[in-house]
Amino acid sequence: MKSTVAQLKTQIQRAMVAAFGADLADTDPMLVPTSNPKFGDFQANVAMSLAKPLKQSPRDIARQIVENLDLGDLCDTPEIAGPGFINLRLKTAYLEAQLKAMQADPRLGVARVEQPQTVIVDFSSPNIAKEMHVGHLRSTIIGDSIARVQEFMGHRVLRLNHVGDWGTQFGMLITHLKEACPEALEADSTVDIGDLVAFYKQAKLRFDTDEAFKTRSREAVVDLQAVEDTATKAWKVLCAQSRQEFQKLYDRLDIQIQERGESFYNPFLADVVQDLDTQGLLVEDQGAKVVFVDGFTNKDGNPLPLIIQKSDGGYNYATTDLAAIRYRTGKDGAERVLYVVDAGQGNHFAQVFQVAGKAGWIPAGVELTHVPFGVVQGEDGKKFKTRSGDTVRLKDLLDEAVSRARADLETRIQAEERQETEDFIQNVAEAVGLGAVKYADLSQNRTSNYIFSFDKMLALQGNTAPYMLYAYVRVQGIARKGGIDFDHLPAEASLHLADDSEFALARYLLQLDTVLEEVAQELYPNRLCQYLFELSQTFNQFYDRCSVLQAEEPQRTSRLILCDLTAKTLKLGLSLLGIRVLERM
Ligand code: ARG
């Protein structure tokens, strides 16, 4: 099923060529949904932008396009409005047929891309032995949603966890482990080193206060790089412990991700340096090997170098990212690499991409994109912390969301004098609590800072997960009440749109494909949230105005189809945000 927008675009482009010649074959007709239904469904704004190059008035241009426009059964006769907008109104019969086709399609009318790409989503990427903090949670939630949308559109997606499992901080961790917990290093030891965050703090304290410890830590780094036995064993123990902790969180949040940490690229780092050197890009600067990047200066206005190899021979975060680019565009065959990482690392990626470009490591047609997001703030607008000023543990944060959702639910159950099982209560609380955390994050424009508020995210009204989940449940309630099986509505049933609210809902439903294409391209999941929110509102307006179960046929079945399509769209949309729906709540 070719999307309505795609069909309209093709037809307008043809009309432009017919009216003004083949030069316009690739000109975008600038087709957008109208802001007000009284202007129809879509407007094409291209006439305004053609006025200058064609040296004609936009209204004249619009008129000539319309004269050549063949819209078949799609639209009523187009109208020209204002300075030269071409307003298009879809024919009722066309809308009805589209909805019917949507209902019969498990993909709800969203076509797979014609040319699937290999897309890498680099997300989550916490650091071993350090706390996985709310910034990583944002990356995890946003990255997962972006990956889900890419997968749904038909791309081959590699979800990669670029875990920080290498670097000089391992010196002190290994040394501390060897000295404070040697049992953990014995063959097939089952010793649990426990809370790694506390462990990290102890190691750091010793490192900062004990010179001899510091020296031993530096030696441990050298040992690790030389793959010495004990150091390597200690490193593995630390990574394994962290991995276990991270995995619990991924499981709980239903996140699929493949670990490919920084250490994976170790064997390729020397080649990065070698190649940059051969190409004459490498410069010695105070003993370090660096590449000077354009457009970046320090505070004195001097060119800023990107350090590739430190004076002690060690490699950097940037070196690893360069090796990763080579591997991903080479071995993995990635055509698009999306780095879902906080906005604070914008310069890092701009520099690394520039160096990779200069070195010729970004094949033609391959796109590397930093997908930045803002910081998480508490309700006081400051950095997100617990009341006592500590960083918030992600497990505690999720637990609190679930227990608050549970408290809300229990209050309602009591007020409504319902009998519910413990399983039901726990299941609903998990879905609502975790859904709320995810949705709150995804519904913000990711580039802004984001204020974390349990009260806001769990509210039943507004652009929240509970609101959306309720809209879905409402439809399921209609089906239960009427004894309706949506999967077995009479095959010959068709749509009969009459009320304004039915038209409004129909138009919203048919925008799903456009919205998803946009999210897949622009990578803003909040666009999808906004759509689902407005769809829920439009549905609620429809449901307030139109009776469904009490309506006469053929209206009754037609309205049931609208209900079903709304529910299916919500379910699909929420699943692409990583949120599962409930049949009852
Ligand atoms: N581990 C890094 C951090 O916590 C994020 C890594 C992001 N991905 C990358 N390819 N650099 O800041």
Image (cartoon, rainbow, N blue to C red):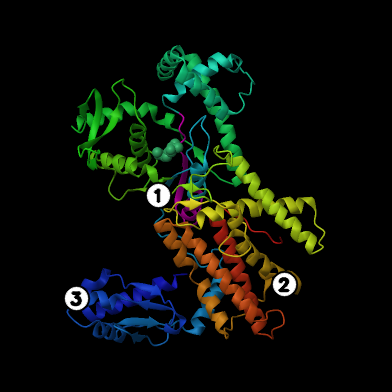
Question: The residue tagged with tag 1: helix, strand or loop?
Answer: strand
Q: Is residue 169 above or below residue 140?
A: above
Image point 59% across, 73% down: which residue?
A: 539
Q: Earlier in the sequence, mark 2 or mark 1?
A: 1
Q: Nearer the viewer, residue 147 or 316?
A: 316
The image shows residue 390 at horizontal and vertical percentages of 55, 37
What's the amino acid at mark 1? Val
Q: Nearer the viewer, residue 455 or 24?
A: 455
Q: Taking the image as drawn, is residue 104 in sight?
A: no
Q: Is residue 438 magenta?
A: no
Query: Which region shows up in magenta?
Result: 144-165
Residue with the mark numbered 3: 52
Residue with the mark numbered 1: 371
Q: Taking the image as drawn, is residue 268 in sight?
A: yes
What's the amino acid at mark 3? Lys
Q: Is residue 162 magenta?
A: yes
Residue with the mark numbered 2: 484
Q: Nearer the viewer, residue 90 or 251?
A: 251
**Is 179 positioned to the left or the right of 420 in the image?**
left
The image shows residue 490 at horizontal and vertical percentages of 67, 76
Q: Earlier in the sequence, mark 2 or mark 3?
A: 3
Callouts 2 and 1 close, C-beta under 8 Å = no
State how many labels appear: 3
Question: The residue tagged with tag 3: helix, strand or loop?
Answer: helix
